[in-house]
Amino acid sequence: MKLNPPPNWPTPAEGWPTDPSWTPDPSLPEPPPGWQLWVDDDAPVAGETTEGTRHHRQAVGAFWFGVLLFLGGAISTYIASGKNGGVIWYGGMIFGAVLLFRAFAAYRSSRKEGAPALGVLGKVAAVVGVVACLGTGITAVSALIGAESIADGVGSCWTVDDESTAVPVSCDDEHQFKAISEAPAAEQCPEESASYLEGEDGENVLCIVED
């Protein structure tokens, strides 16, 4: 048996009784009606850390850390997929997803071990976190796939950035030029060509028109 201090009593400290024969100090407030001062050793007690509460805390911490990691990875991937490039942080999304799965597993374990369920606000916050991860993840992957599928040959579309550099973009997006042919030299581009782009191989040029 162990002591189950009422909520209107001070937090138990070392030296408090462990024997049901103990009589409370008269200066202590009366316990609430029906309160059990002594419970079984395996019964949860307020303020006591049990396996259930420990797993519950682990679940909450892992969940929000996973959300932050996943969002960081997704946002970096989305930005890097733009015309200015950047660092694509796949690791953030991967480790974030792993932590989210571990958080759900820890939460299920805590519930089986008697930990309380999440309150309404906790459930709403968890749903918002999951939806945010799904939304940014889908957006990031779509942007990455779109960036990798952009062509830079005949039929490709181009825009000029702030540094006067021609950048290939999707023809579905806003652009300024379109490549109509490839020629060995700029002089051999069609008459309607507005300009040309030098090829990476240095041998041919890409003839472009305003579009």
Image (cartoon, grey):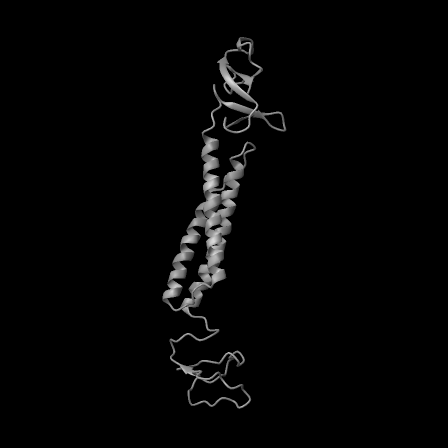
Q: Is residue 15 above or below residue 52?
A: below
Query: Which residue occupies 53% across, 80% down?
Result: 8
Q: Which percent across, then down, holds residue 178? A: 52, 20
Observer-nearest residue: 208 or 91?
A: 208
Quarter of the figure that contains the N terminus:
bottom left
Q: Residue furthest left?
A: 112
Q: Which percent across, then down, holds residue 64? A: 49, 55
Query: Which residue occupies 49% across, 54% down?
Result: 65
Q: Quadrant of residue 34?
A: bottom left
Q: Is residue 46 above or below residue 197?
A: below
Q: Is residue 68 above or below residue 118?
A: above
**Is any part of residue 87 visible from this angle?**
no
Quarter of the figure that contains the C terminus:
top right
**Is any part of residue 81 visible from this angle?**
yes
Query: Which residue occupies 37% across, 67% down?
Result: 113
Q: Is residue 78 above or below residue 16?
A: above
Query: Which residue occupies 45% across, 63% down?
Result: 118
Q: Which percent across, then down, holds residue 131? A: 46, 49
Observer-nearest residue: 89 or 187?
A: 187
Q: How many marks?
A: 0
Q: Which percent across, then down, holds residue 17? A: 46, 85
